[in-house]
Image (spheres, helix red, strand yellow):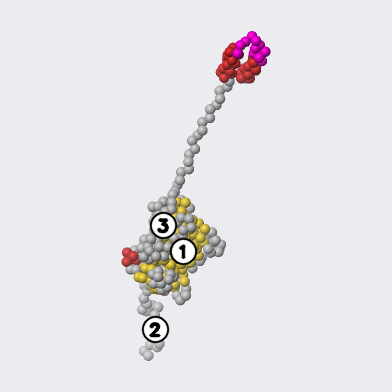
Amino acid sequence: MYFDVIFKLMIYCEKILYLKDNYINRHNKMAILMLFSSLSYIFSPPIQKFRHQPVKLMERHSDYVGVVEPTSNPSSRVSPCFPGRYQTSVESILVQGGSLRTWTYRSPKVEQVQVVLSSEGRPLDADIELWHGPDNTPCKMRVYVENGRTRPFSAVIETPRGPNTVAVRNIGQIEFPIAANVVADVVDMPSIDCVQSSTTIQGGALRTYPFDPRVESVQVLLKTDGRPLNARVELLQGPNNNKQVIELYTEDGCDRPFFCVLETPGSGNVVRVVNTAPVEFPMSASVVPGAINNDLRTGPIMGGDVIIGGDVGW
């Protein structure tokens, strides 16, 4: 209200000063204008000053991209697809048929990750790749499992010199989803017997390893002297009955060796390792028992399941 009145007075006085220019000099005119400007500033309403609130940046919860955050009680969370042996702190992620999921590890401190794939009892068919930089795939795997619940796939991938990305692609049909779990905090390590008992397999050759029914799991360790590694690992139970097949490629078998654990329930399990590389690329293979159930009796029970025929006293 005061501002409008003073503004009108200023306009009226300016007109008077313009008409009375002969009677008032220029200095007096400027003094009157400054007086009315001061009055307008004094009687004008106060201007509210707005203060900008500081914007909080989002805290990064993890150095891993694509990894599911641990739950409130990680030790008690087990994926329903896992048979219970692989209890990890990260809940598994469901990968539908034809889809792709990635896990990125930015920290160079992560030198190993464990990949566990399973299903609800249906076949499992997936591609696993390790990405290190643009257009660089130092490790590739093709995995097939007949029953993802009885024989889940579990392998350790070397990830030196991060950042590294693990990609899991379900190449099966949409009716065959898989549960994928990639962890870096706790990974399986080969036993002393597995590290020491290695044999050389020349390029194009194969080795077979039969196991007793008491053996519940088998450790497989493949490596080279620094050359590329091309191999195929098969788990057979009976003639021409592949329960699990792994086709592997590694650009450096010394820097990135391959280690996996194969579940071998039942009897008649045989692990076959084939060096698919040329003869110039030999590799070292170590296949030893992992878990052994000594309570299982494998021999015949006399008087039990043995039936003796014929007449008595004949």
- Residue at (49%, 35%) from the top-left corner? 54
Give the vertical position of 32 relative to 103 (above or below): above
Quarter containing the C terminus: bottom left
Give the vertical position of 205 relative to 309 (above or below): above
Residue 306, disc: none
Q: Is residue 40 left or right of residue 221?
A: right
Q: Position of residue 57 (x, y in %)?
A: 48, 41
Regarding residue 75, the answer to whether it shows in the image is no
Residue 159, disc: 3
Q: Nearer the viewer, mark 2 or mark 1?
A: 1
Residue linked to disc 1: 141
Q: Which residue range is magenta in the image? A: 15-26
Q: Please state which amino acid type lies under the numbered disc 2.
A: Ile
Q: Position of residue 294 (x, y in %)?
A: 35, 69
Residue 38 painted magenta: no
Q: Please state which amino acid type lies under the numbered disc 1.
A: Met
Q: Please state which amino acid type lies under the numbered disc 3.
A: Thr
Question: How far is mark 2 from mark 1, CA to CA?
Answer: 51 Å
Q: Position of residue 32 (x, y in %)?
A: 59, 14
Q: Nearer the viewer, residue 183 or 33?
A: 33
Residue 16 painted magenta: yes
Residue linked to disc 2: 308
- Residue at (39%, 84%) from the top-left corner? 308
